[in-house]
Every structure is written in structure tokens, then in C-alpha cells.
Amino acid sequence: MYSVLDLNQIIAHTLGKELTADQFTRFDVNKDGFVDVQDVVQIIRMILLYGDTGLRQAETLQEHIYSQYPFSVNQSTEQAVYFIRSIKIGGEDITPEVVGAFKNGLCVGTTWEPEKWEEIMVMGQEPDDTVYTKGYMLEDEIPSFVIKHGSDYIPVTPIQAIDPAQSLEFHNLAIYFIDLVA
């Protein structure tokens, strides 16, 4: 990830122009002052190919990508596995397009088109506080879960599927078996 300042320096050095504060806000989706390296490459490519029109296209593309895929997550060495036994809405089994694990609105794990017993790897914050995992799960925190089903984003409640006495608190290398219900 690059800080907003790094991104502006890269673009200024590469293209001879800087982005406005408003343009940075659009590229900094998590509002944490950082943009993914893939975003930087895409932005530069669009500007090189299409000039200011390309910059507007890059902004539109960025907004489209994150509106369609808000379940982006960075890999971490701190991980827990949550196996999903079932997902039910109103008592009916469903297969959503995606399931995301979140902490304070920040995606910390995802799985696409989950089948029965699909796992979702939930990422924790790296011990060295690396910016890639800043704000991710810490020991003893419980992630929240959201599913995308059709055009709806639905919060779901995790319920221990095998051992009701087992807590769902995040611990590195832990394994959980859950049902998700709404």
C-alpha cells in the first residue's frame, strides 16, 4: 500500500502532475491514508493512456470496483479459520455471492460463493503493526459477518455450530465451525 503522499509523489514524478485532495479521497477507499499498489498502477496507466479523461475514468473505475467488491482484504500471518456450516435467512438455506468478516467496517476476511463447510480466513493485525493489517482482528475480538445476496448486503449473526460452549473470539490459528443466520 502507498500513502496518499507517496501516491502523489509517484504520479507527479511519473506524469508531471499532482492529484487534488478530492481525487485522493476517491482513491483512498478505506479512508486510512493508503491506496493499494494495484490502484496506483491502474491510475497511472489510465492517466498515461487518456490524460485528464483517463484520470476521470480511473476515478470511476475505482469507485465501481469498490462498490462491487467491498470485501477486499489483505493477507496476514495472524489468521483464524471460520468454517461455515450453513447460511440461513428467515430459516431458509441460501448460497450468497460472498461472505465477509468485518471489524468496525473494515473487511478482515472473505469467501466467494460459499458452499457447505466453506472456510473464511479471518485476518488478524500483524504483531509489528504493519499498515497492511492495521485495524484487523486482535486477540479476543469477535468478527461481525455480512453476506451479499443479490443486491442486498445483510448482516448475519455467527452461531457456534458444533460446540455451543466454544467462544467465537479471534485467536491466531484457531478453528471455528459456525452457522450464519439473519
Image: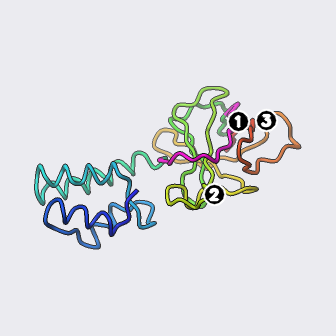
Q: Is residue 33 magenta?
A: no
Mark drawn on residue 131: none
Secondary element type, mark 3: loop
Quarter in which the N terminus is drawn: bottom left
**Residue 91 got which mark?**
1
Taking the view exactly as shown, the residue that stands out farthest to the right is 165
Q: Which of marks 3 and 2 is nearer the N terminus?
A: 2
The amino acid type found where label 2 is placed reads Pro
Residue 64 or residue 36, whichever sits in front: 36
Type of the residue with mark 1 = Gly
Question: Residue at (35%, 52%) from the top-left corner?
Answer: 37
**Mark toward the viewer: 2 or 1:** 2
Identify the disc placed on residue 127: 2
Identify the residue shown where x is 50% and y is 55%. Answer: 132
Q: Position of residue 29 (x, y in %)?
A: 40, 60
Residue 82 falls left or right of residue 20: right
Is residue 38 toward the left or the right of residue 76 in the image? Answer: left
Residue 39 percent coordinates (x, y): 32, 52
The location of residue 169, given as percent across then percent down, is: 76, 51
> Local crowd at mark 3 within 10 Å, few (<14), some, or many (≥20)?
some
Residue at the spot of label 3: 161
